[in-house]
Protein backbone atom coordinates (compact mmCIF):
# COMPACT_ATOMS: atom_id res chain seq x y z
CA UNK A 1 0.00 0.00 0.00
CA UNK A 2 1.30 3.48 -0.86
CA UNK A 3 0.89 5.55 2.27
CA UNK A 4 0.79 8.86 0.37
CA UNK A 5 -2.42 7.89 -1.43
CA UNK A 6 -4.20 6.03 1.35
CA UNK A 7 -7.67 7.11 2.44
CA UNK A 8 -8.61 7.44 6.08
CA UNK A 9 -11.53 5.19 6.99
CA UNK A 10 -13.77 6.44 9.76
CA UNK A 11 -16.68 4.86 11.56
CA UNK A 12 -18.92 7.12 9.49
CA UNK A 13 -17.48 5.61 6.30
CA UNK A 14 -18.17 2.12 7.60
CA UNK A 15 -21.74 3.08 8.44
CA UNK A 16 -22.35 4.39 4.94
CA UNK A 17 -20.88 1.27 3.35
CA UNK A 18 -22.60 -1.09 5.79
CA UNK A 19 -26.20 -0.03 6.38
CA UNK A 20 -26.69 -2.72 9.01
CA UNK A 21 -23.86 -1.13 11.05
CA UNK A 22 -22.61 -4.61 11.90
CA UNK A 23 -19.02 -3.38 11.79
CA UNK A 24 -19.35 -1.16 14.82
CA UNK A 25 -22.63 -1.77 16.58
CA UNK A 26 -25.92 0.07 16.64
CA UNK A 27 -25.79 3.73 17.53
CA UNK A 28 -22.01 4.15 17.16
CA UNK A 29 -20.89 7.40 15.57
CA UNK A 30 -17.49 8.68 14.56
CA UNK A 31 -15.86 11.59 16.37
CA UNK A 32 -12.94 11.56 13.87
CA UNK A 33 -12.54 13.95 10.93
CA UNK A 34 -13.16 12.66 7.40
CA UNK A 35 -10.20 13.33 5.10
CA UNK A 36 -9.09 12.09 1.71
CA UNK A 37 -5.59 11.24 2.86
CA UNK A 38 -4.19 10.15 6.22
CA UNK A 39 -0.80 11.53 5.26
CA UNK A 40 -2.23 14.88 4.14
CA UNK A 41 -4.10 15.32 7.40
CA UNK A 42 -1.05 14.58 9.54
CA UNK A 43 1.72 16.08 7.42
CA UNK A 44 3.83 12.98 8.07
CA UNK A 45 5.77 10.92 5.55
CA UNK A 46 7.72 7.71 6.11
CA UNK A 47 10.05 5.76 3.79
CA UNK A 48 8.25 2.92 2.06
CA UNK A 49 8.73 -0.50 3.76
CA UNK A 50 10.83 1.04 6.55
CA UNK A 51 8.41 -0.14 9.23
CA UNK A 52 9.08 -3.87 8.84
CA UNK A 53 12.87 -3.55 9.03
CA UNK A 54 12.54 -1.39 12.15
CA UNK A 55 10.35 -3.99 13.86
CA UNK A 56 12.72 -6.84 12.97
CA UNK A 57 15.58 -4.95 14.56
CA UNK A 58 13.70 -4.22 17.75
CA UNK A 59 12.09 -7.51 18.72
CA UNK A 60 11.49 -7.77 22.45
CA UNK A 61 11.19 -10.92 24.55
CA UNK A 62 9.15 -10.46 27.71
CA UNK A 63 9.13 -12.76 30.71
CA UNK A 64 6.70 -12.90 33.66
CA UNK A 65 7.63 -10.93 36.74
CA UNK A 66 4.76 -12.37 38.78
CA UNK A 67 1.83 -14.80 38.75
CA UNK A 68 -1.76 -14.05 39.74
CA UNK A 69 -3.60 -16.27 42.24
CA UNK A 70 -7.38 -16.20 42.28
CA UNK A 71 -10.36 -18.38 43.29
CA UNK A 72 -11.40 -18.34 39.61
CA UNK A 73 -9.69 -21.35 38.03
CA UNK A 74 -11.21 -20.88 34.55
CA UNK A 75 -12.17 -17.95 32.34
CA UNK A 76 -15.87 -18.52 32.86
CA UNK A 77 -17.22 -16.19 35.53
CA UNK A 78 -14.38 -13.67 35.47
CA UNK A 79 -15.68 -10.12 34.87
CA UNK A 80 -15.20 -9.03 31.28
CA UNK A 81 -13.54 -5.81 32.40
CA UNK A 82 -11.37 -4.84 35.32
CA UNK A 83 -12.65 -2.42 37.92
CA UNK A 84 -16.34 -3.37 37.74
CA UNK A 85 -16.33 -5.90 40.60
CA UNK A 86 -14.15 -4.76 43.50
CA UNK A 87 -15.61 -7.59 45.61
CA UNK A 88 -13.32 -9.97 43.71
CA UNK A 89 -9.83 -10.10 45.22
CA UNK A 90 -6.65 -11.93 44.31
CA UNK A 91 -2.91 -11.90 44.91
CA UNK A 92 -0.05 -10.95 42.62
CA UNK A 93 2.85 -13.16 43.69
CA UNK A 94 6.08 -11.48 42.62
CA UNK A 95 8.83 -13.77 41.30
CA UNK A 96 12.55 -13.45 42.11
CA UNK A 97 14.26 -11.03 42.01
CA UNK A 98 11.16 -8.78 41.98
CA UNK A 99 9.86 -10.23 45.24
CA UNK A 100 12.42 -8.16 47.16
CA UNK A 101 11.15 -5.07 49.05
CA UNK A 102 13.10 -2.69 46.81
CA UNK A 103 10.90 -3.53 43.81
CA UNK A 104 7.71 -2.30 45.51
CA UNK A 105 9.15 0.54 47.58
CA UNK A 106 6.65 3.42 47.49
CA UNK A 107 3.85 1.45 45.81
CA UNK A 108 1.77 1.60 49.00
CA UNK A 109 1.22 5.29 48.25
CA UNK A 110 -1.00 4.46 45.27
CA UNK A 111 -4.60 3.24 45.43
CA UNK A 112 -4.71 1.80 41.89
CA UNK A 113 -2.33 -0.01 39.56
CA UNK A 114 -2.05 -0.88 35.89
CA UNK A 115 -1.28 -4.56 35.35
CA UNK A 116 0.02 -5.95 32.04
CA UNK A 117 -0.59 -9.69 31.74
CA UNK A 118 -1.02 -12.61 29.36
CA UNK A 119 -4.21 -14.40 28.29
CA UNK A 120 -2.94 -17.80 29.41
CA UNK A 121 -6.43 -19.32 29.29
CA UNK A 122 -6.80 -18.94 25.53
CA UNK A 123 -6.63 -22.15 23.59
CA UNK A 124 -3.71 -22.42 21.21
CA UNK A 125 -4.59 -23.81 17.76
CA UNK A 126 -3.21 -27.34 17.37
CA UNK A 127 -3.54 -27.67 13.59
CA UNK A 128 0.16 -27.09 13.00
CA UNK A 129 -0.70 -24.66 10.21
CA UNK A 130 0.13 -21.00 9.97
CA UNK A 131 -3.30 -19.47 10.44
CA UNK A 132 -4.08 -15.89 9.48
CA UNK A 133 -4.68 -13.62 12.48
CA UNK A 134 -8.27 -12.69 13.20
CA UNK A 135 -8.80 -9.03 12.34
CA UNK A 136 -12.34 -8.81 13.71
CA UNK A 137 -14.04 -10.02 16.90
CA UNK A 138 -17.57 -10.17 18.30
CA UNK A 139 -17.77 -8.22 21.58
CA UNK A 140 -20.18 -9.56 24.22
CA UNK A 141 -21.51 -6.04 24.72
CA UNK A 142 -22.91 -6.19 21.18
CA UNK A 143 -24.61 -9.50 21.90
CA UNK A 144 -21.87 -11.64 20.37
CA UNK A 145 -23.41 -11.24 16.91
CA UNK A 146 -21.77 -8.10 15.53
CA UNK A 147 -18.14 -7.71 14.51
CA UNK A 148 -15.69 -4.88 15.11
CA UNK A 149 -11.97 -4.61 14.45
CA UNK A 150 -9.75 -6.33 17.00
CA UNK A 151 -8.18 -2.96 17.87
CA UNK A 152 -11.64 -1.45 18.44
CA UNK A 153 -12.39 -4.07 21.10
CA UNK A 154 -11.08 -5.41 24.38
CA UNK A 155 -11.42 -9.02 23.29
CA UNK A 156 -9.01 -11.53 24.87
CA UNK A 157 -8.15 -12.85 21.40
CA UNK A 158 -5.45 -10.37 20.51
CA UNK A 159 -2.40 -10.42 18.21
CA UNK A 160 0.04 -10.80 21.12
CA UNK A 161 -2.31 -12.12 23.79
CA UNK A 162 -1.65 -9.26 26.21
CA UNK A 163 -4.17 -7.88 28.69
CA UNK A 164 -4.23 -4.52 30.48
CA UNK A 165 -6.16 -4.06 33.73
CA UNK A 166 -6.66 -1.22 36.16
CA UNK A 167 -7.05 -2.65 39.68
CA UNK A 168 -7.31 -1.42 43.25
CA UNK A 169 -4.34 -2.11 45.53
CA UNK A 170 -5.47 -3.52 48.87
CA UNK A 171 -2.15 -4.36 50.54
CA UNK A 172 1.54 -5.14 50.05
CA UNK A 173 3.37 -7.75 52.13
CA UNK A 174 6.46 -9.89 51.51
CA UNK A 175 6.35 -9.78 47.72
CA UNK A 176 2.56 -10.22 47.51
CA UNK A 177 0.25 -7.51 46.20
CA UNK A 178 -3.39 -8.09 47.13
CA UNK A 179 -5.61 -6.42 44.55
CA UNK A 180 -9.34 -6.02 43.91
CA UNK A 181 -11.36 -5.72 40.71
CA UNK A 182 -9.13 -7.90 38.52
CA UNK A 183 -10.38 -9.69 35.41
CA UNK A 184 -7.72 -12.42 35.46
CA UNK A 185 -7.93 -16.14 36.16
CA UNK A 186 -5.77 -18.16 38.54
CA UNK A 187 -2.25 -18.72 37.21
CA UNK A 188 -2.21 -15.71 34.89
CA UNK A 189 1.35 -14.53 34.12
CA UNK A 190 2.03 -10.89 34.98
CA UNK A 191 4.51 -9.01 32.78
CA UNK A 192 4.58 -5.56 34.35
CA UNK A 193 2.97 -3.38 37.02
CA UNK A 194 2.71 0.41 36.96
CA UNK A 195 0.97 2.88 39.26
CA UNK A 196 -2.22 4.56 38.09
CA UNK A 197 -1.91 8.35 38.18
CA UNK A 198 -5.14 10.34 37.85
CA UNK A 199 -3.55 13.42 36.24
CA UNK A 200 -2.44 11.38 33.22
CA UNK A 201 -4.72 8.34 33.19
CA UNK A 202 -8.16 9.81 33.93
CA UNK A 203 -10.08 11.20 30.92
CA UNK A 204 -13.68 12.05 31.90
CA UNK A 205 -14.32 13.50 28.42
CA UNK A 206 -13.41 10.23 26.66
CA UNK A 207 -15.73 8.89 23.94
CA UNK A 208 -16.11 5.11 24.23
CA UNK A 209 -17.60 4.02 20.91
CA UNK A 210 -20.27 1.34 21.04
CA UNK A 211 -19.72 0.89 24.78
CA UNK A 212 -21.40 4.27 25.31
CA UNK A 213 -24.46 3.25 23.31
CA UNK A 214 -25.19 -0.28 24.55
CA UNK A 215 -26.22 -0.76 28.15
CA UNK A 216 -24.92 -3.85 29.96
CA UNK A 217 -27.78 -5.40 31.92
CA UNK A 218 -26.82 -6.85 35.28
CA UNK A 219 -28.59 -9.78 36.89
CA UNK A 220 -30.30 -10.17 40.21
CA UNK A 221 -28.78 -13.18 41.98
CA UNK A 222 -30.57 -15.55 44.36
CA UNK A 223 -27.99 -17.16 46.67
CA UNK A 224 -29.57 -19.39 49.32
CA UNK A 225 -28.21 -19.19 52.87
CA UNK A 226 -27.28 -22.88 53.05
CA UNK A 227 -25.12 -22.37 49.96
CA UNK A 228 -23.55 -19.18 51.30
CA UNK A 229 -22.35 -20.98 54.43
CA UNK A 230 -19.88 -22.96 52.32
CA UNK A 231 -17.85 -19.79 51.78
CA UNK A 232 -16.34 -16.94 53.73
CA UNK A 233 -18.31 -13.66 53.59
CA UNK A 234 -15.80 -12.15 51.16
CA UNK A 235 -15.96 -15.22 48.90
CA UNK A 236 -19.76 -15.09 48.89
CA UNK A 237 -19.64 -11.43 47.85
CA UNK A 238 -17.21 -12.30 45.05
CA UNK A 239 -19.58 -14.98 43.73
CA UNK A 240 -22.48 -12.53 43.78
CA UNK A 241 -20.42 -9.88 41.98
CA UNK A 242 -19.36 -12.34 39.26
CA UNK A 243 -22.87 -13.61 38.59
CA UNK A 244 -24.38 -10.11 38.56
CA UNK A 245 -22.21 -9.38 35.51
CA UNK A 246 -23.87 -12.29 33.62
CA UNK A 247 -20.95 -14.53 32.56
CA UNK A 248 -23.03 -16.44 29.99
CA UNK A 249 -22.33 -16.16 26.26
CA UNK A 250 -24.78 -13.48 25.18
CA UNK A 251 -26.48 -15.69 22.61
CA UNK A 252 -27.52 -18.15 25.37
CA UNK A 253 -31.09 -17.53 26.51
CA UNK A 254 -32.38 -20.99 27.54
CA UNK A 255 -33.89 -20.62 31.06
CA UNK A 256 -33.46 -24.36 31.70
CA UNK A 257 -29.78 -24.48 30.86
CA UNK A 258 -27.50 -25.11 33.86
CA UNK A 259 -24.14 -23.34 33.93
CA UNK A 260 -21.12 -24.20 36.04
CA UNK A 261 -18.68 -21.61 37.37
CA UNK A 262 -15.49 -22.96 39.00
CA UNK A 263 -14.66 -21.01 42.14
CA UNK A 264 -12.36 -21.83 45.09
CA UNK A 265 -12.61 -25.60 44.64
CA UNK A 266 -16.36 -25.65 44.00
CA UNK A 267 -18.53 -25.79 40.91
CA UNK A 268 -21.20 -23.09 41.26
CA UNK A 269 -24.26 -24.31 39.32
CA UNK A 270 -26.84 -21.73 38.26
CA UNK A 271 -29.70 -20.96 35.87
CA UNK A 272 -30.83 -17.64 34.42
CA UNK A 273 -34.42 -16.73 33.65
CA UNK A 274 -34.89 -13.20 32.38
CA UNK A 275 -32.74 -10.97 34.58
CA UNK A 276 -32.65 -13.37 37.56
CA UNK A 277 -29.84 -15.85 38.21
CA UNK A 278 -30.55 -18.64 40.69
CA UNK A 279 -27.76 -20.71 42.22
CA UNK A 280 -29.21 -24.21 42.09
CA UNK A 281 -26.37 -26.32 43.45
CA UNK A 282 -22.76 -26.16 44.66
CA UNK A 283 -20.58 -29.20 44.06
CA UNK A 284 -17.15 -29.83 45.57
CA UNK A 285 -14.60 -30.44 42.83
CA UNK A 286 -13.10 -33.93 43.00
CA UNK A 287 -9.47 -32.88 42.70
CA UNK A 288 -9.69 -30.41 45.58
Image (cartoon, rainbow, N blue to C red):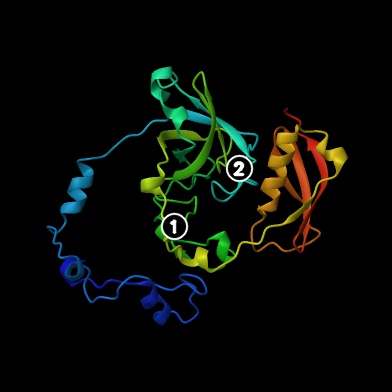
Q: Residues within 10 Å of mark 2 (few under 14, many from 20)?
A: some
Q: What residue is disc 1 on?
A: 204
Please tell me whether mark 1 sits on a helix, a strand or a loop: loop
Residue for point 71% across, 41% down: 237
Please tell me whether mark 2 sits on a helix, a strand or a loop: loop
Does residue 80 appear in the picture of this structure?
yes
- Disc 1 versus disc 2: distance between alpha carbons? 20 Å
Does residue 2 appear in the picture of this structure?
no
Q: In this view, does 57 lie above or below 37?
A: above
- Residue nearer the viewer, 86 or 58: 86
Residue for point 75% across, 55% down: 220
Left or right: where does residue 19 sit relative to residue 248?
Answer: left
Left or right: where does residue 271 sit relative to residue 39?
Answer: right
Residue 99: name its quadrant: top left
- Return the x and y of residue 231 as percentages of the image width and height: 77, 33
Q: How crowded is mark 1: few (under 14 residues within 10 Å), some or many (20 or more)?
A: few
- Return the x and y of residue 11 as percentages of the image width and height: 39, 72
- Return the x and y of residue 240 as percentages of the image width and height: 72, 46
Residue 17: name its quadrant: bottom left
Q: What residue is disc 2 on?
A: 86
Quadrant containing the C terminus in the rendered view: top right
Residue 257: name its quadrant: bottom right
Residue for point 42% across, 34% down: 193
- Return the x and y of residue 131 as percentages of the image width and height: 41, 53
* Camera-side mark, 1 or 2: 1
Quadrant containing the N terminus in the rendered view: bottom left
Amino acid sequence: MTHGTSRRTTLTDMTNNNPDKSVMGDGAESHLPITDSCQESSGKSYPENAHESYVRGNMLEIKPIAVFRSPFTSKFGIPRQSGIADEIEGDIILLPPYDRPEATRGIEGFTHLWVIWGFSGNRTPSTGKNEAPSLTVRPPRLGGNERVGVFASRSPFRPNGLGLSCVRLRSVCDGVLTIAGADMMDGTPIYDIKPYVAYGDCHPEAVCGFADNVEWKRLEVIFAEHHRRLFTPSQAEAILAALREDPRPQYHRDPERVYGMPFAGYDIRFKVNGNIAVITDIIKEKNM
